[in-house]
Image (tube, rainbow, N blue to C red):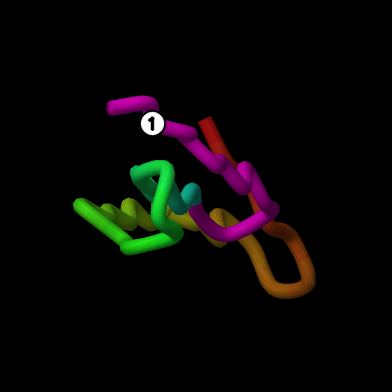
Amino acid sequence: MSYLIGMDVGTTGAKALLIDDTGAVRASATSEYPMYTPRPQWAEQD
């Protein structure tokens, strides 16, 4: 059986899917990045 991993790394988080050769989603995960706002109108991500 073959698998495909799809990933989306965006501004506010990352998402991933594991799909098998029949097109069924076998696993998925998401993780958000923290946003820091040290001053008004400022935004930082590490």
Task: Say if 37 sits above or below 46 in the image.
Answer: below
Q: Which residues are magenta?
A: 1-13
> For this rendering, which residue is in front, 8 or 6?
6
| Frontmost residue, 15 versus 44 | 15
In which quarter of the view is residue 22 placed?
bottom left
Q: Is residue 3 magenta?
A: yes
Instruction: Find the residue positioned furthest to the bottom.
Output: 40
Relative horizontal placement of residue 23, taking residue 27 as reference (left or right): right
Residue at the left extreme of this rendering? 27
Give the total number of marks visible in the rendering. Answer: 1
Answer with the quarter of the image where residue 3 lies: top left
The residue identified by callout 1 is: 3
Which of the pair 29/2 is nearer the observer? 2
Q: Look at the picture and state if 39 lies above or below 15.
A: below
The picture places residue 31, in percent across and down from the top left corner, at 32, 52
Is residue 21 highlighted in magenta?
A: no
Image quadrant in which the N terminus is located:
top left
The crowding category of the residue bearing disc 1, from other C-alpha atoms within 10 Å (few below 14, some 14 to 19, many at least 20), is: some
Q: Tag 1, which secondary structure? A: strand
Residue at the spot 56% in from the left edge and 41% down from the top edge: 7
**Magenta residues: mostly which secondary structure?**
strand
Left or right for 21, reference 26:
right
Q: Is residue 35 left or right of residue 39?
A: left
**Image spot of residue 24 (x, y percent):** 33, 63
Q: Residue flagged by tag 1: what amino acid is it?
A: Tyr
Q: Residue furthest right?
A: 41
Position in image of residue 19 (x %, y %): 39, 48
